[in-house]
Amino acid sequence: MPFKRTPQKFNAAINAMTLGTGDNAVTIGGASVLPLYSFDGDIGNAPKIGVEISDLGLEGECVGMTEFYAGASTPAEMAAKAEKMPGADFVCLRLEGADPNGHNRSVEECVEIAKAVAGAISLPLVIEGCKNNEKDAELFEKIAAALEGKNVLFLSAKEENHKSVGAAVGLAYAQKVGAESSVDINLAKQLNVLLTQLGVKAENIAMNLGSAAAGYGFEYVASTMDRVKAAALGQNDAMLQMPVITPVASEAWSVKEAMVDEADFPEWGPQEDRGVRMEIATAAACLACGSDAVILKHPRSVATISAMVAALK
Amino acid sequence: MALKGLDIFKITPKTNCKDCGNPTCMAFAMKVAQGAIALDKCPHLSDEVKAQLSEATAPPMKTIKLGVGAEEHTLGGETVLARHEKTFVSKNLFAFTVGDAMSDEANEAAFASTVVDYERIGERMYVELINVKFGGDSARYLELVKRAAGLGRTLILSVSDAAVAKEALELTKGTRPLLNGASAANAAEMAALAKEYAALLGVSAANLDELYDTVAEIEKTGFKDLVLDVSSASAGEAFADAVQIRRAALKNNDRTFGYPSLVDVGAIAPGDEDMQCALAALFTVKYGSIVVMEKMSYASALPLYGLRQNIFTDPQKPMRVEPGIYPLNGADENSVCAITVDFALTYFVVSGEMERSGVPVNLLISDAGGYSVLTAWAAGKFSASSIAKFINEEVAPKVKSRTLILPGKVAVLQGEVAEKLPDWKVVVGTREAIELVKFLKEM
Ligand code: SF4
C-alpha cells in the first residue's frame, strides 16, 4: 500500500515583493505553502540572501571578512565586493555610525554614503538604520529622496516612528518599508495595520518580526513566525501576508559564543568559526521557520546558506 | 486524531456502576479522552472493545527509549507540529560518526567530539550518540564498536549485514542501542535481531512508499521500536521526508509513520562542517529526532545546542537560571552588584552586555518565577521586599560592596529598596541591556 501523501495547500499566499529595478531586481515571498515545503506546492521565490556591510567598515572584523574585502576602504568599495560574494542576492548597508550615542554621523554624510553605495552596485539595496528611532526617521527620509526610483527597502519602521518613516519612505518616495516588531504576532499585525492606514500599500511592506541568535530566545522567533505564517496562509490574513526579512548577522555576531577570544576560551576554538556557525545555524533556523530573506555578512555563511536554499527548492 | 469523549462513551456499558471511581460512564469517557485515566480502569469492557479503543486512543507518535541508565534518552511522543500549539517533548539527539571505512585520522577526529561537554541552563550539552558505520571490514568495525561502547554514550550501529550486526549487538548487549540497518531486503531478519537484543531498529528505503511498506511489514511481526532513517543524498529529499512523516503521524493520524526520524547530515554534506551545521539547525527546528554529523566541535555545538534548548522549551514554562551571585569579568566581593530576574533570556542578554563592558560586576539573579523584569514586577515577584530579602539573606553575607544597581525598568522601586536596605547605595541602571556597556564604563 503506497503512502498516502496529503500536501498542505492554502488558498492564500505570502505577498511577492520586488526590490531593485530592471534585470537585477530580486523578488522575495510568494509562497502558498509553509516555509520551504516545496514538496507541497509553490514556494514562490526561494529565500534570498542579503550581504550586510557597515558604514563603519571592517572595525573588529575577523580575518575571513578582512581578506574578502581586502583593498576596499570605503562603504562603496565594500559594496562592490559584497555584491560579488557568491550567493549574494542583494546588498544591505547598515548605517551603524549614525547612532547619536556612538559615532553620530550626520544625516548628510549618511546620504552621501548611501548614494555612493547605490552607485557602486547593480543588485538591489536595503538600508538598515542605527536603531535610534528619531535618527532613523530623519535618515530614511533623506536617503529615500536621494535614491528615488531605485526601489530600496528600509529597515525599519517601528511603532514609535512608523508615521514619519511610512510617510516618507512608503508614500512620498514610493520605496519599500520594513515593519519591525519584537517577536509578537499581534504587534506585527498592528504595525502593518497602522502603516496601511497611513496609505502605504500592503504589497510595499516587508516584516522584520524580530530576531534572536540561536540559544538567545530563539523560541520566540520560531513561534512568532510559525503563527504569522499559519495566520497568513491558513486564515488568509492580509495584514500578515507580508514577506519576512530577518537581519541575522547583527544578532549572531554579537553573542558571547561568537565574540570571545580563543585566548579566553581555548577549548571553544577559533572565534571566526564560532561566529560563522552561529550565523549559519541562526539563518538556517530562521529559514525553517519562515524568513523569506535573511541578512548575513560572512562569505562562508552566505555561501552555505545559499547552497542550502538551492538544495531545498 | 484522538478519540472524542462521546465516541468512548458509546462503547461503555452505560450502567454508571462507579467501579472505575467515576460517578458516571460519561465522566469516565471524558477522562479517558483527555488521557487522564487509563481505559482498563473500567472492568466491564470486553477485551475486544479494549483492544480496539487502546489502538485509537494511543498517541499518534510512539515514545521510544534509547540507551539505558543515565544514558537513557526519550525519542518521539510528539503531539503537535508547532511548539506554540502545546510543546515539543523529546529534544532531538546528536551523533558523530566513526567507521571501518574511514581513515584512522578521520576516526580520531570524530572521537574528539567527546570533548564537547558542558552545561547550559541546567542541561548537559554533549553528543549523546555515536554512529558506528560498517563499511565491509568486520574485524575493524567490531574494534570500533568496542571502543565507542566504552565512551559512556549510546551507539547507533549502522550495519545492514545481519551476521556483523549480531556480533556488534553482542558487544553492546544490555545498552539498548539503535541497530540502523533494516530495509525492504532484510526487514524480517533485522527485526528479529533487534527484538532478540532489545535494540531499536532503524529502517530506511529508497523512497517514502517503500519505507511505508517496510514499516508495515515489520509492524506485522509485532516489533515496533522503530526509527525512520530519512537520510538521502539530497538535503531537499531528506527534509521533504522528515516533514511528511511527522505530518502524516500527527496531522493525519497515520500511525505507520508514527515513529521518530533519523537524518545523517554528515552523509548529505561530507567534509562540509558549515553545511552540516546549517542542516543540523534545519532538522532541529523541523522534525529530525536524531541528527547524525561527521563530528561535533564547539563551534557547531554552541549554536546548535542553544537552538535545541530554545525550540524544546515548554512555552508554558519560561527558561530559568539558578538564582545566585554570578561574578563577571573577574568580580570579587568588592565589586558593584547589579540585580535582575531569573528569566534565562534576561540573564543571557544582561550578562553578555556586562561581559562586553569589561567592568567587574556581581550579577545578582533573584528568584522571580522565571519572568522578565516587567512581568515579574507586575506579578509581585520582583518587588522591593523580594529584592531586600534576597540581598539580606543571600548577598550581604558574601559581598562587601554596598552598591546595588537596579534595572532601569523598575526605577520606581528605588526609594522603597533604599529604605529597606539602609546601608546600600541603590542606583538605577539602564532600561535596555544594550546601554549597559556605556553605563558601567562611566560608573
Ligand atoms: S466502571 Fe465502567 S461501567 Fe462502571 S461507571 Fe465506570 S465506565 Fe461505567
Image (spheres, coloured by chain):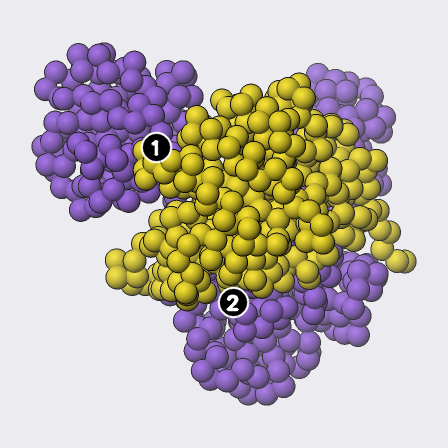
Chain colours: A yellow, B purple
Q: Mark 1 touching mark 2, by CB under 8 A?
A: no
Left or right placement of residue B434 versus residue A124 in this view: left
Output the chain of dot 2.
Answer: B
Of the residues shown, which amino acid type is indicated by label 1?
A: Pro
Query: Within the image, what quadrant is residue B384 found in?
Result: top left
Q: Residue at x 27, y 15 (%)?
A: B413
* SS for callout 2: helix
Where residue A100 is drawn, which disc sits there? 1
Seen in the picture, residue B47 relative to B423 is either above or below; the reply is below
Output the chain of dot 1.
Answer: A
Query: Within the image, what quadrant is residue B196 found in?
Result: bottom right
The yes-or-no answer for disc 1 within 8 Å of ligand 1 is: no
Of the residues shown, which amino acid type is indicated by label 2?
A: Glu
Q: Which residue is drawn at 56% across and 35% down?
A: A144
Q: Which residue is drawn at 90% across and 58% down?
A: A1
Give the alpha-carbon distance from disc 1 to disc 2, as whole Å. Answer: 40 Å
Q: Give percent across and percent down for residue B378.
A: 40, 16
* SS for callout 1: loop
